[in-house]
Amino acid sequence: MSVSRTYRQKLSVAFDFPVVFTRDAFRASNPALHKAMTRLRERRVHRAAVFIDAGVARGRPNLARDVARYFRAHAKSIRLVATPQIVPGGESAKNDLSRVAAIMRRLLQWRLCRHSFVIVIGGGAVLDTVGFAASLVHRGLRLIRFPTTVLAQGDSGVGVKTAVNFGAGKNLVGTFAPPFAVINDEAFLDTLSDADWRGGVAEAFKVSIIKDAAFFRWLCANAARLRRRDPAAMRRLIRRSAELHLDHIRTSGDPFEFGRARPLDFGHWSAHKLESMSRYRVGHGQAVAIGLALDACYAARKGWLTERDCTAIHRGLGECGFTLWHSLLERKTADGKLEVLAGLRDFQEHLGGELYITFPKGIGRKFEVQEISAALVAACVRELKRAAT
C-alpha cells in the first residue's frame, strides 16, 4: 500500500520600488536616475541599455544625446552598453511579437545580466513591449521606466504588469514584473499631442469613480483647466491618479491578480473590445472614456448610481474633450448581437472562467457583479448615441 506525503510550500517575496516625480531627469545635476540605479549600494559599475520611443525621440531630438551625457557625468557608477536605441511607439508596437524578440536579442548580444538595467523611455505601448522583453531575458532584468504620457505616468507606468497584443486580443500575452524604479519626468508632457495629453484623464476618472469621491469632484471642477493643458492641474491629476493605483496594488492583497476581479479595469471590458474592433485606431484613453460612459449609464439604470452622478461622469468626461460615442458600439455580429459584448467573454477568460465586472456603487465606492444584461447594454448604447446626436 503506497503512502502519499505532501510538503506544503509557501513563499513570500517582497517587491520594493520607488516612483519618483521630477523634471528634467537627464540634466546631469538631477540625482533621480543615478540614485534609483545605485539604491542597493552594490559595489559595481552598473551596466544599462536604454530604449527610446520613436515618437518621443521626434519630439525631443536631443534626448539620446542628453541620456549619453548623463551617463558620462556619472561614469564612476553607471555606464551605457550601447548608444540609446530608438524603437517604434504607439499601439502597433504591441501587435508584433517579432519586435519583442528583436529587443531580447539585443539584450543578449550585450550580455546583460540580472543585475543589469533596461531603461525604457516612452508611452505605455513601448513600456509594455520593452518591459515584456526585459522580463523574459534571464527571467527578469532590472527595468526602470520613464513614462512619457499622462496615461503612463498616472496609470500603466506605475503598475506591475507588462503585456502585448496577440491575434485580435488586447494584452493577451504578458508577465507580472514589477519595475526596479519609475521616474515620472513632467518635462515629457510638454510636447504631447492633445490626444495623448487627454488620454490619461480617462484613467483618472476611472480610479476616482471607484475609489475617491473628492478626487472625482476635483476632476469635474477642473475639466476646463485640464482641457486647455494647465500644467499645474495635470501635475495634480497625475500624482493623485498614480497614488490611487499604487495604493490599490499595495493594499488589495492581490497585486498579481490571482483573484476573481480586476477593479482597476472598471470600464475596460468594452474599451478593450472597441480598441481591437477599430484595429487600434481608437486610442486607449478615448476607448476608456466611452467604456466609463457606457458602464455609468448601466449603473444608473440598475440603481447603483444616481442619475445626477451619471450625468456628472458624462459631463466631466465631455468637458475634458472626450467623445462618448463611437459607431462601433452598435456594430452587430451575424447572429444580431452587439459585437462589443464579446468583451465580456474576453474578460471572463482573463479571470479564470468566471465573470466579475467592477461597477461603482455611488461615487468613490465599488462592487463586483457576475451577470451583465445584454438588453440593458443595448439600451445604454442607444442612450449614448442619442446624447451624441
Image (cartoon, rainbow, N blue to C red):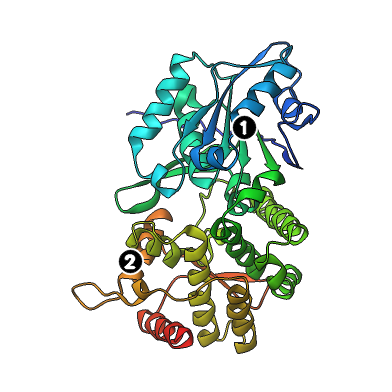
Asked whether the residues under the numbered discs 1 and 2 touch, taking CB atoms below 8 Å apart as contact, a structural biologist would say no
Quadrant assignment, res 151: bottom right
Going 68% across and 71% down the picture, which residue do you hit? 223
Of 335 and 381, nearer the camera is 381
Q: On screen, 293 above or below 385?
A: above
Residue in front for this viewpoint, 69 or 245: 69
Give the quarter of the image for residue 78.
Answer: top right
**Label 2: few (<14), some or many (≥20) within 10 Å?**
some
The residue lying toward the viewer, choosing from 376 and 323, is 323
- x, y percentage for residue 257? 53, 50
The residue that label 1 is drawn on is 62
Sequence order check, earlier mark of 1 and 2: 1
Label 2: which residue? Answer: 342
Q: Secondary structure at mark 1?
A: loop
The amino acid at mark 2 is Ala
Relative image position of residue 142 (x, y in whole percent)? 59, 27
Q: Is residue 305 visible?
A: no
Circle 2 sits in a helix, a strand or a loop, which is it?
helix
The quadrant where residue 113 appears: top right
Judge from the rendering whether residue 324 lies leftward or rightward of residue 70; answer left or right: left
Three-letter residue code for mark 1: Asn
Residue 261 picture location, percent across and down: 51, 59
Q: Residue at x 65, y 45 (%)?
A: 188
- Alpha carbon separation for disc pair 1 and 2: 44 Å
Residue 18 pos. (x, y %): 72, 37
